[in-house]
Amino acid sequence: MSEPTRGPARPRLEVWFERTVSGESRGPGEAASRGLLGVLAGGYAVGLALRDAAYRLHLVPRVEVNARVISIGNITLGGTGKTPAVIHVARHFRDLGERVAVLTRGHGGRRLSGVTVVHDGVERLLGVDEVGDEAVLLAERLGDVPVLVGKDRRLTAAEAVSGFEASVLILDDGFQYRRLVATDQIVLLDATRPFGTRRLFPAGTLRDPVSYLARADQLWLTRTDHPRAMEPDELRRAVAALAPGVPLHRTRHEPARLTSFPAGQGLDLAALRGAKVVAMAGIGNPEAFEATLRSLRTKEIIAEPFPDHYRYTQEDIAALVRRATTAGCDAVVTTEKDAVRLDLWPAGGPELWVLGIELVFEGMGPVW
């Protein structure tokens, strides 16, 4: 089984940022860039400290709603698996008989102001252009759970409670959003890079200082089965030092289903065993998607990573089809998040398969 063969280069700015903040790029120019980014990160740190003080001293009003608010977020840039976690928690409380609603910002969509109902608990009302790919994926995977989009989660929370009588609100990407009081703070840490580069943006990949982990009620390690995951005991000690007493749970992203696109016909996951595929992924961590494919004993992977939330063009699709055909691939495989951003796949070309995953706890999960 071969390692992935890389496809087209990612955007230059993204590559430059990663190579610069990681220290991979060396030289006078890169050193000067890191120095400038460090100065900017210092200003960002001051802003975060002032903001934190304003909330701790109650200088900024916070809204409470008559519902349990479960925030699911992270402290790093890039994908940590928030969407599977949101789906898992929403299903858990829905199956307990609670009236659940999901509140998300709608990244990449046009309707960010006010309150936009993506799914009303009966049907999906809007598409990717209006509300972004994550909101559409949540609506499709949850089916009967209202999904609301809006930058101001105080407004969407109020609408979920008054309009849908929600008793449990799931706040997607909510750790940095403090204007709405959360009763449960869940922070996800990717076991392959739990603390990013350990430096604040833009000098690194941290959205918040690692000390903020102490504010969490639960910490969930994701992708613990990834080949590059930190050694469990070492990671447990590092987390305990930063957030003493905060419960820590280990999770993995388990392949759950394989479907054809656009028909949605179910396929056996064993179809990937021994197959040669193009891996098309416009997500925060495309390497994790490739690792999942390798875990299914895919014979050869031609990796085609794209930026997170990327909107595919007809030219992109044509290039992917040519690459898969020229390489003699059995199929192109993509994620469910990518699939909601696709329109039609050309007839007569290679098959397009969509791989779905579920979040699974290792050992005991949280006690709610």
Image: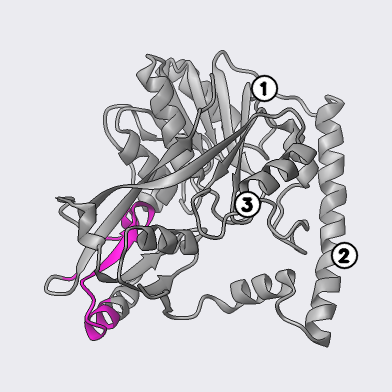
- Answer with the quarter of the image where residue 8 lies: bottom left
For the point 24% across and 53% down, the residue is 269
Using the rendered image of the protein, determine whether residue 298 is visible from the camera's viewpoint: yes
Instruction: Specify start and end residues of the magenta stretch as a single range.
Output: 321-346
Q: Earlier in the sequence, mark 2 or mark 3?
A: 2
Asked whether the residues under the numbered discs 2 and 3 touch, taking CB atoms below 8 Å apart as contact, a structural biologist would say no
At mark 3, the secondary structure is loop
22 left or right of 283 in image: right
Name the residue beneath numbered marker 3: 231
Residue 12 placement (x, y as % from top left): 59, 79
Q: Nearer the viewer, residue 160 or 208?
A: 208
Amino acid type indicated by mark 1 = Val
From the viewer's perspective, is the residue at label 2 or at label 1 nearer? 2
From the viewer's perspective, is the residue at label 1 or at label 3 nearer? 3
Q: Earlier in the sequence, mark 1 or mark 3?
A: 1
68 left or right of 347 in image: right
316 left or right of 104 in image: left
At mark 2, the secondary structure is helix
Q: Is residue 349 above or below residue 41?
A: below
